[in-house]
Image (tube, rainbow, N blue to C red):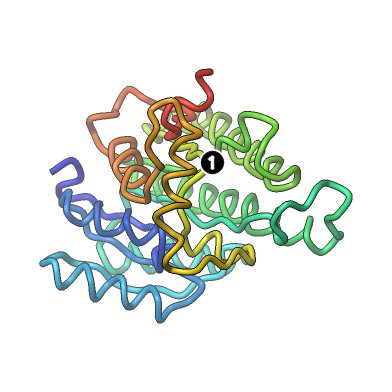
Amino acid sequence: MLLEGKKAIVTGAGSGVGRASALHFVAEGAQVLCADLDEDSAKETVRLVEEAGGSAVPFGVDVSKEPEVEAMIAAAAEQFGRLDVLYNNVGIPTPRLGSVLEDHTAADFERLFAVNVGGVFYGCKHAVLRFKEQGSGGAIVNTGSVAGLVGWGGTVYGATKGAVHQLTKAVAIEGAPFGIRVNAICPAGMPYTGFMAAGGIDLPEDSLADVAASVGASHPLGRPITAEDCAAAAAFLASDSALNITGVLLPVDGGYVAR
């Protein structure tokens, strides 16, 4: 029970890594506010949590809008009495598969930075304010990416994740005197998810196993990275088992960046 008694927010909880993380956090003992742009998807995650015997509440939020993020933090504190963990998981991919730098429009650039960087900035800002007000520290986990560690994965998308990584390290240093820890997980290529669907990648159901095997073959360990892998890493970093870990960018990549 890594997160026993913890009160947490997971953004992007309506699908993919977010849903897996909400379920995993609850299985580890947390109560979770399941936040997503699509509130119906968040409600479905809550249904799955409750079906498994856990406790969660849904919340609709556009993380690119500061007032909505501020309201999300306040709602969690009101619902649970306090906030212990924020998992900034929301992200959007390069809008067109295979786009190089010059293919991106100004609107592409602005949207990628508004969601991928703005969402993490607003989340960190208002979580830090809440943690300082409570006076008992707290943990923030961000979803970065291997694409922010190496020159791979879409130029502008990778730049947004590089910014997430820098925010993670800088806020970790600023928050340390207040007992606030900030870390990020950095997944590599994963099998088909809702995140990829948002980027216009549409794969037939009967091809998913082959795609997963192909992606996994690109990693030294030879296995695809799953949403559950990411959820387990995020739960560890959010837990008291990681009390002396902050400012870390943890690859969840089957050894990809070690080569």
Q: Horizontal and vertical percent for residue 120? A: 56, 50
Residue at screen point 29% across, 42% down: 232
Q: Residue furthest right?
A: 102
In which quadrant is the N terminus drawn?
top left
The foreground one among 182 and 218 is 218
Question: In the displayed structure, would residue 215 be above or below residue 80?
Answer: above
The quadrant holding residue 158 is top right
Quarter of the rendering containing residue 55:
bottom left
Residue 63 position, x and y percent, is 56, 63
State the image quarter where residue 13 is shown.
bottom left
Question: On the picture, is 47 further left or further right than 211?
Answer: left
**For numbered disc 1, what is the local secondary structure?**
loop
205 or 4, nearer to the observer: 205
- Inspect this view and state whether residue 66 appears: no
Q: Is residue 216 above or below residue 92?
A: above
- Residue at x-position 36% and y-position 58%: 9
Q: Give the vertical position of 254 relative to 104 (above or below).
A: above
Label 1 packing within 10 angstroms: few (<14), some (14-19), many (20+): many
Residue ID at (35%, 64%)? 76
- Give percent across and percent down for residue 191: 45, 52
- Which residue is farthest bottom? 40
- Residue that mark 1 sits on: 144
Residue 223 versus residue 103 in the image, above or below: above
Count how many numbered circles sit on residues in the image.
1
Q: Which amino acid does label 1 sit on?
A: Gly
Image x and y of residue 27, in percent? 17, 54
Rendered residue at 69%/58% (across/down): 114
- Tell me if I can see residue 179 in this picture: yes
Outermost residue, top side: 259
